[in-house]
Image (cartoon, rainbow, N blue to C red):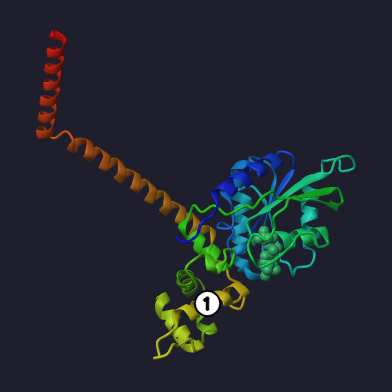
Amino acid sequence: MALQWFPGHMHKALKEIKESLSQVDVLIEVLDARIPYSSENPEIAKIRGDKPCIKILNKYDLADPDITAQWQTYLESERGVKTITTSSDKPGTSKQIMAMIKTMFAHKDVQHKAIKAMITGIPNVGKSTLINILADRIIAKTGNEPAVTKSQQRINLGDGIILFDTPGVLWPKLENPHSIYRLASSGAVKNTAMEYDDVGFFAADYLIKAYPEVMKSTYKLDELPSTELEFLEAAARKRGAIMAGGRVNLHKICEVLLNELQSGKLGRITLETPQMVAQEKIEIAEAAAKKEAEKAKRKQRFKEGSLTPDKHARKEKRNEKRQEQSRRMKKR
Ligand SMILES: Nc1nc2c(ncn2[C@@H]2O[C@H](COP(=O)(O)OP(=O)(O)OP(=O)(O)O)[C@@H](O)[C@H]2O)c(=O)[nH]1
């Protein structure tokens, strides 16, 4: 895989988050609603312990509302966190988040003690945009290039709430090999960081299965091909992505598909569901167990192989020789 996270930076950020977390009342974790699992850093859940948490499913305007509802049910019932959907174009976001925090800490005497919230999120998830919405002014620099936000800030939101931005840059943690492709497909990871065509093929494979009607109508296809290659070839012909000699330009059509997916031109699309992720987790655990079992078997075979009768006899002879030599040495 061509992509490298920076483990050193990640460790530093997690250490700083852990230190800061002990001083706050609530953690606000911003996720990308299109990839709520892949845009999460599972280490945060471990560090958080039982600290109250609000998971914000941001970029809701780009996500499939039905699947977002499934994610909210899963996160609230299985993970015990509060959830809110937000998007930069949705009015009332700030009020909604502030009201949720106030309700969670209704028992706290805000006259005397402010509620401290810390906001985290992987690069490009929309954290800075959200901070600006919450603060109602431009505080954090926003942009389409991941990791624009760098410094930690303390922002008084008023109404007895203080917001702390995350120290350091928090990268996603990739426990599932599909996650990197979902991050790249959604644009959370820069397109240049990975093989563009690999990401395009991955997206095409998912989209023709999960959103067949959308793909058929967007690319004006009479029949939807059953493989991603055939789909990309058909879409390329429809969009004029043809090279000299009449061959289809797969690189170009992958670029078109990813741009249309990321900009919302394909409609509201989510790239993973709770059921899919649960099934993948089982498969990953099974594959890891199989690998371990094979490793143990190899080890055992090696052990047994090193003690075949012939080898064993030779080893015995060598030992006898050594003992004889040491007896002679002692006699002298
Ligand atoms: N469609 C849509 N785009 C959004 C939303 N929120 C943010 N964006 C866009 O996503 C991109 C990243 O937003 P930022 O707010 O800079 O993200 P960030 O998480 O602070 O990113 P870093 O600076 O990398 O940490 C920008 O192009 C935003 O305009 C949203 O709710 N919907």
Q: Which residue is mark 1?
A: 255
Q: Is residue 74 above or below residue 23?
A: below
Mark 1 residue crowding within 10 angstroms, few (<14) / some (14–19) / many (20+)? some
- Residue 180 drawn at (x, y percent): 51, 60
Total count of labels:
1
Residue 235 left/right relative to 125: left
The structure residue drawn at horizontal position 59% and vertical position 42%, both measured from the top left corner, is: 46
Q: Position of residue 36 (x, y in %)?
A: 59, 58
- Above-or-below relation of 5 to 68: above
Q: Residue furthest top?
A: 331
Q: Quadrant of residue 97?
A: bottom right
Task: Give the quadrant of ligand 1.
Answer: bottom right
Quadrant of the image containing the C terminus? top left
Q: Which corner quadrant of the image does residue 301 belong to?
A: top left
Circle 1: element type: helix
Question: Outermost residue toward the bottom?
Answer: 245
- Residue 159 in sight from this viewpoint: yes
* Amino acid type shown at disc 1: Glu
Residue 132, percent across and down? 78, 61
- Is 238 displayed left or right of 138 in the figure? left
Q: Quadrant of the N terminus?
A: bottom left
Residue 126 appears in the picture as rendered: no
* Among the 4 quarters of the image, the one containing residue 114: top right
Residue at position x 89%, y 39% from top?
112
